[in-house]
Amino acid sequence: MRTVQGSFTRICTMPAAYFPLFLFVAVATITPGGATTLATASGARFGFTRSIPLMLGIAIGLAALAAIASLGLGSMLLAVPALQTIVKALGSAYLLWLAWRVARSGPPNTGDGPARPSTLIEGILLLWLNPKSWAMTVGAAASFALLASSPNRLAMLLGGAFGVAACVSLALWCALGALLARVLRMPKHWRMLNLVMGALLAASVLSMWR
């Protein structure tokens, strides 16, 4: 009887114990940044369905980073300043290239700009070349380590939480982009939107060097 009551008590207290983690992950993934900006721009230009590989790539990349951080490997990057600088430089160059592609785009039917949406692999690279993502997942692993009984369980917990939250938040931002596309009627409106999206994506590079 006591065993049953103890199990029931643990089940009831689990949601309360995990709530801070879920809140942190939700806020971290839905906050505007390079990934959300790219999802919005992709949704506006290519539509929601064609943007799914990009969103899945970003979500998989973030989930993998969270799992790696939980196993203690992510801190290795943060402990080597030279390696951090290399990743920052590569990530900045990649984001600036994406920003340039977005900013120079016109309406989708003109062929002026990217002819295809970003791929799953490109979405993964967007996360893996961003030291801010490494720092965020390492911080989460350190803050919520007591929620799991082993590093492997923590990797599964954080990987799942970040992956699911990223899918939801990116879907919302991408849907917003697709909705904006229905409102834009003139080429100048498209160019204005693309310039704004490109500028926001380029501005996200600044957060890497703070």
Image (spheres, rainbow, N blue to C red):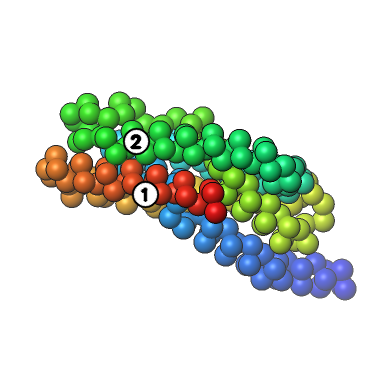
Task: Sort mark 1 into few (<14), some (14-19) or many (20+) by Cα contacts within 10 Å.
Answer: some
Q: Is residue 52 left or right of residue 77?
A: left
Q: Amino acid at mark 2?
A: Trp
Where is residue 124? Give x, y as percent.
54, 35
Which of the image's four quarters has the C terminus?
bottom right
The tag earlier along the polypeptide, 2 or 1, is 2
**In the foreground, 152 or 113:** 113
Task: Sort mark 2 into few (<14), some (14-19) or many (20+) by Cα contacts within 10 Å.
Answer: some
Q: Is residue 210 left or right of residue 100?
A: right
Q: Which residue lies at the image location 57% right of the left edge and 65% below the top edge?
A: 23
Q: Secondary structure at mark 1?
A: helix
Query: Measured along the vertical axis of the image, is residue 167 above or below residue 49?
Result: below
Query: Could you give the CA–CA distance between mark 2 and mark 1, rounded to whole angstroms?
Result: 11 Å
Where is residue 146? Give x, y as percent.
78, 62
Q: Amino acid at mark 1?
A: Leu
Q: Secondary structure at mark 2?
A: helix
**In the foreground, 160 or 29:** 29
Quadrant assignment, res 99: top left
Which of the image's four quarters has the N terminus?
bottom right
Query: Which residue lies under the disc numbered 1?
Result: 200
Q: Is residue 210 left or right of residue 139?
A: left
Where is residue 81? Give x, y as percent.
68, 43
Can residue 144 be seen at all in this image of the molecule? yes
Where is residue 87? Give x, y as percent.
59, 37
Q: Which residue lies at the image location 71% right of the left edge and 54% below the top edge?
A: 141
**In the foreground, 164 or 130:** 130
Instruction: Determine which of the numbered discs, if any, sits on residue 100 in the image.
Output: 2
Labels 2 & 1 near each other (Cβ < 8 A): no
